[in-house]
Image (cartoon, rainbow, N blue to C red):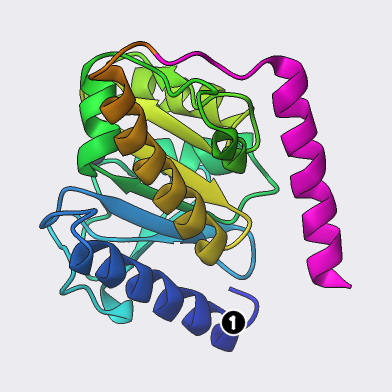
Amino acid sequence: MSDPRDDAARRAALVAVVRRLDARGLNRGSTGNASVRDASGQGMWITPTGMGAEVEPDDLAWLSLDGATARGRWQPSSEAPFHLAAYRARPDRGALLHTHSPHATALACLQRELPPFHYMVAVAGADRVPLVPYHLFGTEALSQGVAAALAGSDAALLAHHGLVAIGATIGRAEHVLDEIEALCGIYLQALAVAEPPLLTPAQMAEVHARFRGYGRAQRA
Ligand SMILES: [Zn+2]
């Protein structure tokens, strides 16, 4: 861990997001989990198993990226393997959030992906939010499925399970998770009436281009 102060800030930000998700009903009890890369890039801080919004920064468990070394008072989340797999697949991403949030989970229980029915689906960086086939939590098969889905998207639905979102920062991961959860709710409402028509690849390409331009304008 190269800079203890930087690590402390990352851990505090992670805990703040976990509490916010709980307060907003996007996570319940200890069902979800969350992680950030450490400042050295050699490992990650992750919420411990069996702990929810009561988590404190000192409760977070540390795991090396290969999963071989663990530190901390508590056992890391049982879903730590797919966090590690996601970081190995996406060196450009520094945080992962996983929830059993109601709308995304309802859609995942129908074994449906989130298609480009609304332009904001592009917030996750692709034309659709893919569905990872069902595998038991904590398994290598689930880790491989999550890593493959997140290689091309910043969010994925896990069949009969929930939602994952990643970001360069924990704030960005929270933004993606929040948007995708809301869009899943809108999609379910639309599905109750009819199968909604979809935007074309060309229309989605325009949205991606506009989002990239918007990002540049914000930094100027
Ligand atoms: Zn889960």
- Foreground: 166 or 35? 166
Let me know if residue 30 is in the magenta part.
Answer: no
Of 170 and 62, the residue lying toward us: 170
Residue 10 appears anywhere in the view: yes
Rendering quadrant holding ligand 1: top left
Q: Neighbour class for label 1 at 10 Å: few (<14), some, many (≥20)?
A: few
Residue at the image point whose x is 49% and y is 57% from the top: 175
Q: Quadrant of residue 100?
A: top left
In the image, the segment drawn in magenta is 196-220
Residue at x-position 36% and y-position 28%: 187
By secondary structure, the bulk of the magenta-drawn segment is best described as: helix
Front-most of 119 and 143?
119
Query: Does residue 35 appear to the left or right of 41 in the view shown?
Result: left
View extreme (front): residue: 193
Q: Position of residue 168 (x, y in %)?
A: 63, 56
- The quarter of the picture where the C terminus appears is bottom right
Image vertical order of residue 110 relative to residue 205, above or below: above
At label 1, the amino acid type is Asp
Please give the residue where the numbered disc 1 appears in the rendered image: 6
Side of 158 relative to 36 (left or right)? left
